[in-house]
């Protein structure tokens, strides 16, 4: 596979090539070894932490090694029910394991009776394309047809379903059990179940009463080590005759607690500046501009919270990380009310995905730029 070139090496969306992908060597190796040896994976990390890029990087590497493997990725974060899940699943794989001959279309039509597939020519490229529609009441039948299509292709496939915990929000009962019943017998298809809500993902794959119990190899993403990330960043700056002082990168890393997307965003904007060397003045200007651009959005976030929740959220932001938000010292320092009220506020903020709790038991504001805005703007 030919790597793609980018004008700015610090990507903030999508995946280009290994050249612009930082580290994750151990995680990539784990994913590839698991898939090659018949193990499904549950991949867990906060949003914008790099799990989607990691999936695409693993698929890129895997397909570079084996040309006869088919890799698919789809995100179900926006889906609300099984019907929408089946629609996006079908759109992702339908016809992708075949060429577009009349014989192939006949075979696809036989497999996907519920989808009522139609074939047409793209008006711009002239290449055949398949479209379909499925009725909500036929979702379960359609799901079975997708798995039958994959199984009968006899081709090695890897499928990544991102934000997999979303299926727990579907109104239909038994979706987990239904999917598990198909996944366990799809021998030629291996899955990556990726999710950002740790408590939901842990429950799905670790609770003895859940269908996916101990059915995957679990991978939890952590921050890319600062030293490794610093070398990656400095090398890309150096390729364009630019200099990124190591202490400045350390400041960036600490400012956003090592959170991948926020580091990339800041580096992307630094790199785009005309000068060849950078200082904290440049960093401060970039961060200030970002916070000003998001000012209206962050004000809206605050308006959706109760006064008590906002006070707790702001207090956590000012501490950057806190292990004991109900401790008397924390409460007194930030003029908070009773520990019981703070506990309820923390739970609500976690449910809203505004606060996260890491594996070390530390609480922090998930959106790093929002955290900086709260720290600089809101006064208790």
Image (spheres, rainbow, N blue to C red):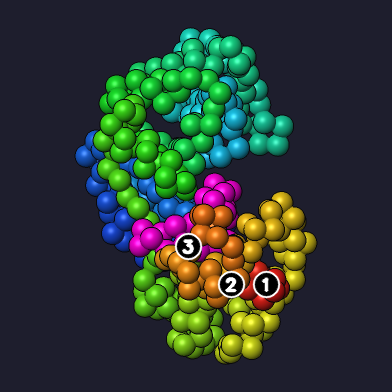
Disc 1 secondary structure class: loop
Spot occupied by residue 53 in the image (x, y as percentages of width and height): 46, 54
Q: Residue at x 57, y 15 (%)?
A: 115
Give how far apart the Cα atoms at labels 2 and 1 are.
7 Å
Residue 270 in view (yes/no): yes
Q: Badges 3 and 2: C-beta atoms under 8 Å apart?
A: no
Q: Which mark is residue 326?
A: 3
Nearest to the observer: residue 53 or residue 210? 210
Q: Which mark is residue 380?
A: 1
Give how far apart the Cα atoms at labels 3 and 1 are.
17 Å
Residue carrying label 2 = 334
Q: In the rendered image of this protein, does residue 309 appear above or below residue 79? A: below
Range of residues picked out in magenta: 344-371
Spot occupied by residue 368 in the image (x, y as percentages of width and height): 57, 66
> Relative to 228, is 244 on the left or the right?
right
> Relative to 54, is 317 on the left or the right?
right
């Amino acid at each position: 596979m030919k790597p793609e070139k980018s004008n700015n090496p610090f990507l903030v969306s999508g995946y280009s090539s290994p050249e612009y992908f930082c580290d994750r060597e151990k995680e990539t190796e784990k994913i590839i070894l698991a898939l090659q040896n018949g193990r499904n994976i549950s991949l867990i990390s906060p949003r914008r932490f790099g799990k989607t890029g990691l999936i695409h990087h693993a698929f890129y590497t895997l397909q570079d090694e084996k040309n006869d493997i088919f890799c698919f990725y789809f995100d179900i974060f926006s889906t609300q029910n099984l019907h929408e899940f089946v629609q996006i699943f079908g759109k992702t794989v339908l016809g992708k394991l075949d060429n577009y001959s009349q014989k192939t279309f006949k075979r696809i039509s036989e497999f996907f009776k519920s989808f009522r597939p139609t074939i047409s020519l793209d008006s711009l490229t002239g290449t055949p394309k398949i479209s379909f529609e499925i009725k909500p009441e036929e979702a379960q039948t359609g799901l079975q047809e997708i798995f039958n299509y994959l199984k009968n292709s006899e081709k090695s496939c890897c499928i990544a379903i991102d934000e997999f915990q979303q299926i727990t929000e579907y109104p239909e009962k038994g979706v987990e059990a239904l999917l598990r019943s198909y996944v366990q017998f799809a021998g030629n298809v291996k899955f990556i179940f990726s999710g950002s809500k740790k408590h939901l993902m842990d429950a799905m794959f670790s609770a003895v009463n859940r269908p996916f119990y101990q059915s995957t190899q679990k991978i939890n993403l952590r921050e890319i080590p600062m030293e490794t990330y610093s070398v990656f960043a400095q090398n890309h700056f150096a390729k364009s005759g630019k200099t990124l002082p190591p202490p400045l990168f350390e400041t960036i890393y600490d400012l956003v607690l090592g959170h991948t997307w926020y580091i990339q965003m800041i580096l992307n904007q630094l790199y785009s500046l005309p000068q060849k060397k950078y200082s904290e003045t440049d960093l401060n200007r970039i961060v200030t501009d970002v916070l000003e651009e998001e000012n209206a959005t962050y004000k809206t976030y605050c308006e959706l919270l109760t006064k008590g929740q906002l006070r707790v959220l702001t207090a956590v932001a000012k501490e950057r990380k806190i292990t004991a938000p109900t401790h008397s010292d924390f409460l007194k320092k930030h003029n908070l009310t009773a520990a019981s009220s703070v506990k309820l506020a923390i739970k609500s903020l976690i449910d809203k995905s505004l606060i996260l709790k890491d594996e070390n038991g530390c609480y922090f504001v998930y959106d790093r730029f929002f955290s900086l805005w709260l720290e600089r703007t809101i006064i208790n």
